[in-house]
Image (cartoon, coloured by chain):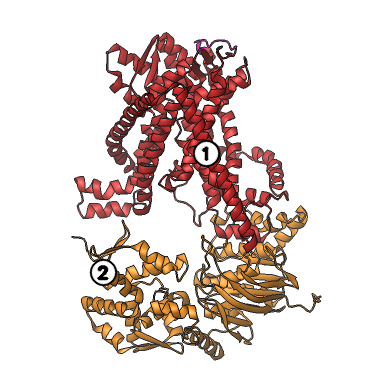
Amino acid sequence: MLDPALAALLSVDHVTQVFQTGSGEKRAPVLSDVSLTLKSGQIVALLGRSGSGKSTLLRIIAGLTRPTEGTVTISGEPVNGPARDVAMVFQSFALFPWLDVLDNVEIGPRANGVPLDETRKRALQAIDTIGLDGFESAYPKELSGGMRQRVGFARALVVQPKILLMDEPFSALDVLTAETLRTDLIDLWQDGRIPIKSILMVTHNIEEAVLMADRILVLSSNPGRIASEIPVDLPHPRDRLDLEFRALVEQIYALMTQRPVAAKPAAREAAAAAMGLGLALPLVSTNSLAGMLEEIAAPPYDGRADLPHLADSLQLEVDDLFPLAETLQLLRFAELEEGDIKLTPLGQRFIDMDVDQRKKAFGEEVLAHIPLASHIKRVLDERPSHRAPATRFREELEDYMSEDYAERTLRAIINLGRYGELFAYDENNQTFSYENPQ
Amino acid sequence: MPLTTFVSAGRRVLPNQWDLVAFAAILAVLTAVAKSYHGLSAPLPAPSESPVSLDYWQLPYYAFRTVLRMFAALAASLVFTFTYATLAAKSRRAEMVLIPVLDVLQSVPILGFLSFTVTFFLGLFPGNTLGAELAAIFAIFTSQAWNMAFSFYQSLRTVPDDLNEVARGFRLTGWQKFWQLEAPFAMPGLIWNTMMSMSGGWFFVVASEAITVGDTTITLPGVGSYIAKANNEGNWSAIGAAVLTMGIVILLYDQLLFRPIVAWATKFRVELSESQDVESSWVLGLIKRTHWLKLGFAPISAGLRSFSFLPISFPRFAPQSETGKAQGRSRIFDALWILVIVVVAVWATWLTVSYIATELNWDEVGRVFVLTCYTFLRVVLLMALATVVWVPISVSIGLRPRLAEAVQPIAQFLAAFPVNLLFGAAVSLVLAFHLNPNIWLSFLIVFGTQWYIVFNTIGGAAAFPNDLREAAANFHIRGWQWWRQVILPAVAPYYLTGAITASGGSWNASIVAEYVKWKDHSVVAKGVGSYIAEATDKGDFPRIVLGVAMMSLFVTLSNRLFWRRLYAYAERRLRL
C-alpha cells in the first residue's frame, strides 16, 4: 500500500484518450500516453494549442471524463468519477445565471451536505478573500467579466480543494482585467491565503504560463503528448520585460513551432499522407494571410519576424497566430524556424502583386500543396456534370479525422478554393462546381 | 421576446420507421377505448348536473368553473412534462419510443379525441360529473402537454456543457442537478410554451364543456356550455354577455398571470449580457416592491431551496462510457427492445385495421380520403389568404415601434380568445343570407388562428435591424424588390413560427368549424372535420377512428414534408 503522505498529490499514468464515433469506430487519439505528477506547493501550466487535448486532460484529472487507457490518482486514491479534492475554474465562468453570487458560491458545499451555517461562513470567507465583498446579492448578468471570474474562483475555493484546476481562466477577459486577476491570484497564493496545495492550469498563452507557473508542460498536437517540460525558477513578481523572461518565452515559441511530423511518421499517418487527405486545415481568413505577409515584409521586420514580437504587434493570441503562420508555411509563402517566420521569394513577390495576380498565385499554391484541393478538382473534372456533393468529401475526410475537424477542414478548403478561384461552392445544395452565378 | 411556439419545428424532417410505430400505437389506444365501450347497447350514463341557466349573474361563476378546469389541466400538464420529458431525455431506449409518440400526438386533432375521452372517463365514473369534468380537463391537457413536454425535452438536451461539468464536478445528485441546473435552464422555454399553450387552451375548454356523444349529452357549467345553450336558443344578448365575460377573463389571465410570469422567467435565461428587450409587467413590479410579501415568502423559498438540495440520487439510465463487454450486452438489449416495439406496433396496426374493417370498407376509406383533401384544400387556401392579407399589414405595423407596441398585445389577446364562441353567431349569418356553407364556413377555420401569423410577423418586423433598413433606403430599394429581397426574408423565420402554429390550429378548428349548430339547424361544410363531428354526434366510433387517423396522417405529412423543411431552411439561411 502506498503511504498517502509520500504519494504524489496528483499522478497521471500513461493516459490515452480516444473518442469513438456513434458507430463505435475508433478515431485517432486525442491524448497519447500522457504521464505527469503534481507536488504540493507548485503551480503547473499545461501549455498547448487548440486540439492538443489539454482541456480533455484537465477533465480526465477532474474525473469528469474517463480515459480510454491509463489511470489518475489523487493523494494515492484512484479517480473514478468526479474527484473529491479538486475544483475547477472555467474559461466561460460557467456560473448559474439564475443564482446570485452567494448562492453560486454556496452550491458546492450545499450539494455535499455541509451544514447551512458552516456553508454560509465559508462562502462569506471565500467571497471576502477573493475581493467580492458587497456583490453577494448580485446576479452574474450584472457583473463584468472579471467579477464573474472572481465568483468562479470563490466557488472553487469554498469547497476547500487540494488542487485547483483552471481551464484557460483568463482567456475570455480583456488584457487589463486578465492581468489584474493573475496578479491577485499569485499574491493570494504567495501569501498562503488560499488553502490549496497546488494549481494546475491549462493555457495557450505562452507569456501567461511563464508569468505564473513553476513548471510548464508543453503539449504537442494531434495527438496530444507531453513534448517537453520546462522549469521556471524566476522569482515572483515576474517582470515581462526581464531578459530571462523574454528568453524563456522565445524558447517556448521555438519549441511550439517545430515541425513534429518529420521525426517518426507512424504507419497510419504515413498512409494518410500518401493519400494526402489526412491533413487537417485550420480555418483562417485569406485577408489575414495577406495582411500577415505584408506585415512581415514591412519594416521593422523586413521579411523575417520574431513570432513573440509579431504576436504582440498584431495583438494576436497564439491560437490565432500559429494557424496563420502554418498555413503560410504550407502554401510556401513563408517558412518557420526557431520561433521566427521568414518570407520565401514567392512570399516576397506576392506582396507586389495586384489583386488578380494574388488570387492566381494563391490558387496555384493551394492546388499544388493541399492534396484535398487537387482531389476535389480531379473529381469535378471526372464527372460529366462537373458537380460534386460536399458530403462525399466530408465522408472521405472523416476516415482520417474527427467530425469536427472534417467539417472545419471542408470549410477551410471552400474558403481557400473560392479565393483562389479553383471551384465554386453552393451553400444551398451543398455542392462543389465550376459554375459561378450568371 | 421569444417567439418560438412550435418547438419541434427544428427537428428532423422526414418521417421514419419510428413515426410509423408511434402512429400505430396511438391509433391502437384510441381503438381499444372505442372498442371497450362500443358493445354497450345502452346509452352511456349521463351525469346528473343541473342544466345551465342563461342568467347573466351566473356568468362569473361559470367563468370561474372554466378557469378552474384550465388550471387543473395546467397542473396535469406540468406533471406530465416533468416526468415524460425527463425520462425521454435521460434514457436512450425510452427516447426511441417517447419522442416519436409525442411528435405524432402533436398532429392528432384534439377535438377528434373528445368522443373517446368522454366515453372513457364517463365509464370510469358512471353517473358522476367527475367523469365529464375529467374528460374536459383531459381535452385541455392534450392541447398543452405535448408542446410543453417537447420544450422541456429539448431544453434538457441542450444544457450547456460547462454548467453540466460544474454540476458533476461538485457531485450534485440527480435530484439536486435537476432542480439546480436542468429545471431552471428549461424554465424560459417551458414558461413561454406553457403560456402560449394556455392561450390555445381556451378554445378547447369551451369546446369540451358541451358535447354530445351518441345519445349522451354532457353539459358542464362553464362559459362554453352557456354559449352552447345561447346558440341553441339563438339568444343574442346572452352570446354577447358570454363573449364579454370571456374577454375579461382572458384579459385578467394575460395581465395577472402570463406577463408577470414571462417577465419573471427572464432571470433564467443563459446569456452573458443583459438582454435589450426587457419584458415588463406592472404586476411583477408590484410584487417585487411589496416588502411584506417578500418577507412572507422568504422562509418558503428557503425551505424549497433546502428541499431542492436533498441528496436523492436517481438510477443511472445511460452509463457515460461503456466498456466492451457492457457494450455487447447493451446491443443485445437494444435488439430485444426494438423487437418488442415492432411486435407492439404490428399488433396495434392489426387491432386498428380490424376494428375499422368490422363496419367500414375501402370505399369508406376512399370517401374519407377525398373529404380530407377538401379540408386540406380549405386549410391551404385560407392560410394563403391570411398570409396575403396579414403579412403586409403586420410588416407595416412592426416597422413602426410605437404602433407595434400597441397592436402586439391585442393580437396576442385575439389569438387566445376562443372564437368558437362566435361560430353560432357567424352561422346565423350564413343561414340568413343563404350562403354556400362549403365556402363561407371555411373562413371560420382561420378565424382564431390567423392572429398567430399576425403577432409573430409583427415581432419579426419589429426586430428588423435598423442598419439594414438604412442600407435599403440608401440604395433606393423600393417596391416589390424591397419586399422580395429585404423584408420578407427577414421576417420569414418569425412568420413560419406563426404559420406552423396557425396551420395546426386550423386543422383542429375544422372539426368545430365545418359542422356548426344554430338553433335547430346544423350547417355542414363537406370535409373530414364535419365527418368526425357528425360521427361524434352519432357515437359512430369506427368512423371517428378512421377520420381522426386520416386527418392525423395529413397533418403529420404536411408538417414533415412542408412546414419543417421550410422552417429548417429559414433557420439556416434567413435567421439574422
- The lab-note entry on whether marks 1 and 2 share a chain reads no
- Chain letter behind tag 1: B
Residue at the image position 68 percent from the left and 50 percent from the top:
B315
Q: Position of residue A61 (x, y in %)?
A: 65, 70
Quickly name the residue at label 2. A382
Residue at the image position 37 percent from the left and 62 percent from the top:
A391
Left or right of B382 on screen, residue B215? right
- Chain letter behind tag 2: A
Q: Is residue B51 magenta?
A: yes
Task: Give the residues drawn in magenta, as a range.
Answer: B48-56
Q: Amino acid at mark 2?
A: Glu
Residue at the image position 35 percent from the left and 41 percent from the top:
B457
Label at residue B345? 1
- In which quadrant will I find the N terminus of chain B? top left
Q: Position of residue A52 (x, y in %)?
A: 52, 75
Q: Position of residue A53 (x, y in %)?
A: 55, 72
Real-space Cα separation, disc 1 to disc 2, in angstroms: 47 Å
Q: Colour of chain B?
A: red
Chain drawn orange in the picture: A
Q: Is residue B46 visible?
A: yes
Most common secondary structure along the magenta stretch: loop
Q: Amino acid at mark 1?
A: Ala
Q: Nearer the viewer, residue B489 or B125?
A: B125
Report helix, strand or loop for mark 2.
helix
Q: Is residue A134 visible?
A: no
Q: Nearer the viewer, residue A15 or A39?
A: A15
Q: Position of residue B367 (x, y in %)?
A: 35, 25
Label at residue B333? none
Report helix, strand or loop for mark 1.
helix
Dot 2 alpha-carbon crowd within 10 angstroms: few under 14, some 14 to 19, many 20 or more:
few
